[in-house]
Image (spheres, rainbow, N blue to C red):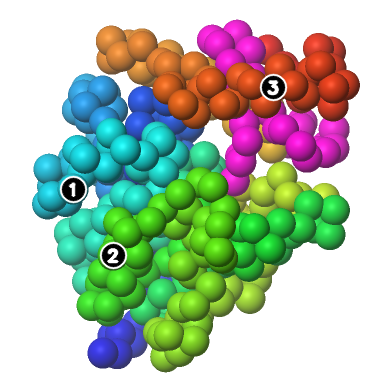
Amino acid sequence: MERPTETPSDLGLDVVTLFNLAYAPLGLSFIASVRRHIPEADVWVLAADEETATLLTRVVDPRVHLLTLDDTRFAEVHELRRSRTPSEFCWTLKPVACAAALSRSSASRSLLYADADTYFLRHPRELVREFDESQTSTMITRHDYSQEYDQTSVAGKFAANLLMLAAPAGDRILPDWQEDCLSLCSETPANDHFGDQRYLESWPSRFPDQIHVLQQDELLGSPWNVDRRDLDRLVAYNFHGLTLLSSERVLLTEGYKISDDVIRDIYLPYLRQIRESIDLMRDARVEPTFVRPGTDGKRMLTRIAMALRQGRLSADSPYLVRL
């Protein structure tokens, strides 16, 4: 099934993401960046828990559309929420969120999925243009690791934190991805599996006429490659590892080195937006949850405590800052 031929300016763009209460300050900040840089976009948000659904109904924006777990018609949803960690559960929901948004979005628009810890720094028109010119149904992106941080053997070549979709992706790619994630979506790497993203490794060979790999890697930044990025060229940044420890303390990154320039130009403006998002939550009478709830929280605190004890993260680390 071929996509209709349109110019990038005619094609337009809608956006989809998902998050739970623990990620709500980041998710609201992501939405704010979309509204700031892509004001014409409709934003579809799958709420991974009831608290997030309540929050989104109280933060009224006519261009932001709530998707609930009931909207997904996902029969196993409550069972999987009990048996999987919060991270695994959200990863499992990713193809579901994409499919739900794609079915509701205008057929003439591309759909961009991004994880909630992503932030747009400017309009992603170069991404839209490359995707449109590819005339495929799905554009995936590479991790593009710097050598020092190469985790390809564990996490795979492709990143599931940002991808672009057109209507034909709903015919086969998203249903197959959903079935894969329902079957297994573990945060414990094993047998060429890791969460939702190692499934993308087979897509170029399984769907050769429908998959395009982004060629402009330099448009996307993250802690594992920002040392090789021109900050002025970045379209979006993924704040992988940024952890809200409390209403006053945040860990910018764990296990990566980021320069003073990156902290000043990328992280500090983001933290200002995070503070605004926390205030927005409290105005909506929904209290933020800091660190991560449940298993994720215990694991994160254990890692931070271990890093402090081993000297890999000092109490006066430049990566531990006031929010």
Write down the residue under mark 1: 76
Q: Earlier in the sequence, mark 3 or mark 1?
A: 1
Q: Earlier in the sequence, mark 3 or mark 2?
A: 2
Give, as a single range, the part of the protein colored magenta. Answer: 238-265
Q: Earlier in the sequence, mark 1 or mark 2?
A: 1
Residue 250 forms part of the magenta stretch:
yes
Asked if disc 3 and disc 2 are in contact, CB closer than 8 Å, the reply is no
Asked if disc 3 and disc 1 are in contact, CB closer than 8 Å, the reply is no
Could one spot residue 19 in this view of the protein? no
Answer above or below: position of 202 versus 79: below
Q: Nearer the viewer, residue 109 or 140?
A: 140
Answer above or below: position of 90 versus 161: above
Write down the residue under mark 2: 179
Give the distance between the C-alpha atoms of the residues marked 3 and 1, in whole angstroms. Answer: 34 Å
Q: In the image, 208: left or right of 40? A: right
Tell me the crowding category of disc 2: few under 14, some 14 to 19, or many 20 or more residues within 10 angstroms, Cα based. Answer: few
What quarter of the picture does the C terminus occupy?
Answer: top right
Residue 96 forms part of the magenta stretch:
no
For numbered disc 1, what is the local secondary structure? loop
Residue 304 is tagged as: 3
Residue 290 is tagged as: none
Q: In the image, 282: left or right of 146? A: left
Q: Position of residue 52 (x, y in %)?
A: 28, 28
Q: In the image, 229: left or right of 266? A: right
For numbered disc 3, what is the local secondary structure? helix
The residue type indicated by label 3 comes to Ile
